[in-house]
Amino acid sequence: MPFKFFKAKFNGDPNVGLYGFANDEYCLLGLKPKEKILKQMKLTLKTDVKISTIAGTELTGLFIAGNKNGIILPKIIEEYELKKLKKLFDLNLEIIKSKQTALGNLILCNDKGCLISEKLKRFKKKISDTLNCEVEIGKIANLDIVGSIAVANNKGCLCHREATEEEMKKIEEILKVKVDVGTVGYGSTFIKSGIIVNSRGIVFSEISTGPEIGRYEEVFS
């Protein structure tokens, strides 16, 4: 099955990854894109697209993280949003009662494993139980914001260009995928902000350059 590509923006914003994430079972977004974009996303990722705000905002990708087994939620989620998610998904849903609420920036995961920030270390077991995978604590480019400077599917992981060999080896062992470095959208190292990806396709920032798109193909397909 060919890996598909779709260059997009949401309401004029090329930072598509801030609005959601995907895996092979579903894509979750904080806003409903224009019908043409939504249709193309479904064709690209070959999965259903679910819509739910988190903490009253459309920035769902910033506040949560998940895989095919579960979703990690911040304590600032609204009650109506939690009820909606329970209706949308038959998955493990776990609220993390941490002062750190931008969980999407602190958790890097796929269906095989998970790397979390030191800031979430006391929730390691809870995250592992929810996602049903191995969880380790680590850094990328010596930074704690592992979820914002890397993105993974079940085939590969693209990291901040200053990630060390040791860090990349650790990610490779935990997520069980190939790992490489790159950028998104004219050189940004905040990889998450410009990518929504699963094993079938990628929706990426419309300001991505040719070399960046080539790297997406190398890593994720």
Image: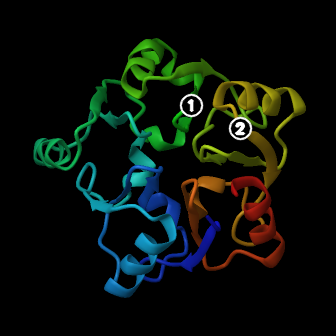
Of residue 191 and residue 200, the one placed in the foreground of this image is 200
Residue 177's disc is: 2
Q: Position of residue 54 (x, y in %)?
A: 28, 50
Question: Label 1 sits on what residue type?
Answer: Lys
Residue 133's disc is: none
Q: Are marks 1 and 2 in contact (CB under 8 Å)?
A: yes
Q: Secondary structure at mark 2?
A: loop
Work out whether residue 7 can be spotted.
Answer: yes
Q: Which residue is pictured at 76% across the width and 48% down the height?
A: 160
**Left or right of residue 210, residue 7 in this image:** left
Q: Residue furthest right?
A: 165
Q: Residue furthest bottom?
A: 36
Q: Quadrant of the N terminus?
A: bottom right
Q: Secondary structure at mark 1?
A: loop
Question: Label 2 sits on what residue type?
Answer: Val
Q: In the rendered image, which quarter is residue 170 located in? A: top right
Work out whether residue 116 can be spotted.
Answer: no
Say which residue label 1 marks: 112
Decide: few, some or many residues near mark 1? Use Cα within 10 Å; few <14, some 14-19, many ≥20: some
Decide: few, some or many residues near mark 2? Use Cα within 10 Å; few <14, some 14-19, many ≥20: many
Q: In the rendered image, which quarter is residue 108 located in? A: top right
Q: Which residue is pictured at 56% across the width and 58% down the height?
A: 197
Q: Position of residue 205 (x, y in %)?
A: 60, 72
User: How has the structure been colored for display?
Assistant: rainbow
Of residue 15 and residue 127, the one placed in the foreground of this image is 127
